[in-house]
Image (cartoon, rainbow, N blue to C red):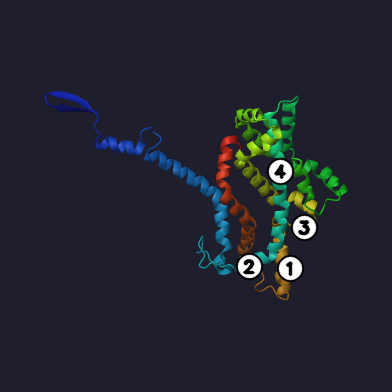
Amino acid sequence: MKLVHETNRFVLKKVNTTGTRVKKALLGLQGNDGLIFKTFIYALLISVGFIYLYPILYMVSNSFKSLSDLLDPTVLWIPKELYIENFVKAWHVLEFPKTFMTSLLNSVLPALAQMVSCAIVGFGFARFRFPGKNILFGLMLLTFIIPTQIVMIPMFLMFEQYGMLGTPLPFIIPAIFAGGIKSALFILIYTQFFRSIPPVLDESAQLDGANYFTIFFRIILPISIPALVVVFLFSLVWHWNETYTASLYLGDSMSTLPLKLKEFNDSFRVLYSSSSGGESSGADINESIKFAGTVLVILPLLVLYMFAQRWFVEVLDKTGITGE
């Protein structure tokens, strides 16, 4: 504020002095939109982001290094040349086309089944009132914290009795009935999402003669695309990365990419020692080849997430579930 003289009178006017403008630029009008606050926020975000991205960046950088770059202490992040021979070797060791299709079979089909079946169960918990609903909901959530190792033996014996071992059926059949990996979390996501949809939509549809079957498939599901996509992606990722039960149920008949990565060293020695006539020269495995194999395994998931990340943000904002 500044006192200004105007034709025989003094008036109090608000004048933007240099100091005021500097203070406004640094602190902002509300105290949270100035340069200092924004700098702090961006520094915090970049620091947290770097912590999460560092392992991936380190892995990608080293996967393109030749053996000379890998042994050269002056080469830290950027290799002198993009050495793609590591990926060629990892591609052959992983038997990528065959193993990739097996991974898709054991992850996409269960994910599709869980996406639909868990939506039906979640809609029931969100819309219907019935005796014992809270108890059933609590028991359903309880299954989320029970370790897989506890039910491993009875599940294995059951699948063996029905002749499902060595096939993707131990993952697909439970998913069809809203079971399987992390189904409790998916039902919780759907329940929270459907509760955010106004019930007046159901009532309006009922006035037009629609039953709950029509309401669910023709009204609720079309406006629940973000939740469907997120559940599908979560389920796909968890089934894709599953190695414990996959090795138990699939045995030696099928191998997914993560399972193949577990035995990467042995497969590499068998493949390249035999192709080089048992000579170790040029056939030794190094960290760059291992990193290249890991990049090939996670690359499909990274590409998938790049196209679907906006639905992640939307549905997690609505449900308040982080999926951790």
Labelled disc at residue 251: none
Q: Up-down: is 225 above or below 259? A: above
Instruction: Please tell me in which quadrant of the rendered image residue 13 appears.
Output: top left
> Whole-Å distance between the Cαs marked 4 and 3?
22 Å
> Whole-Å distance between the Cαs marked 2 and 1?
16 Å
Q: Which residue is mark 1?
A: 270
Residue at 61%, 58% in the rendered image: 295
Residue projecting furthest to the left: 8
Labelled disc at residue 254: 3
Considering only order in the chain, which callout, 3 or 4, is on the residue closer to the N terminus?
Answer: 4
Considering only order in the chain, which callout, 3 or 2, is on the residue closer to the N terminus?
Answer: 2
Considering only order in the chain, which callout, 3 or 1, is on the residue closer to the N terminus?
Answer: 3
Label 3: state its secondary structure: loop
**Nearest the eye: 31 or 65:** 31
Label 2: state its secondary structure: helix
Whether the residues at callouts 4 and 3 have beta carbons within 8 Å, the answer is no
The amino acid sitting under disc 1 is Val
Considering only order in the chain, which callout, 4 or 2, is on the residue closer to the N terminus?
Answer: 2
**Residue 19 placement, left or right of 82:** left
**Nearest the eye: 102 or 118:** 118
Considering only order in the chain, which callout, 4 or 1, is on the residue closer to the N terminus?
Answer: 4
> Whole-Å distance between the Cαs marked 2 and 4?
35 Å
> Whole-Å distance between the Cαs marked 1 and 4?
38 Å
Labelled disc at residue 114: 4
> Whole-Å distance between the Cαs marked 2 and 3?
22 Å
Instruction: Work out whether residue 86 can be spotted.
Output: yes
The amino acid sitting under disc 3 is Met
Considering only order in the chain, which callout, 1 or 2, is on the residue closer to the N terminus?
Answer: 2
Mark in front: 1 vs 3: 3
Mark in front: 1 vs 4: 4
Q: Which residue is mark 2?
A: 88
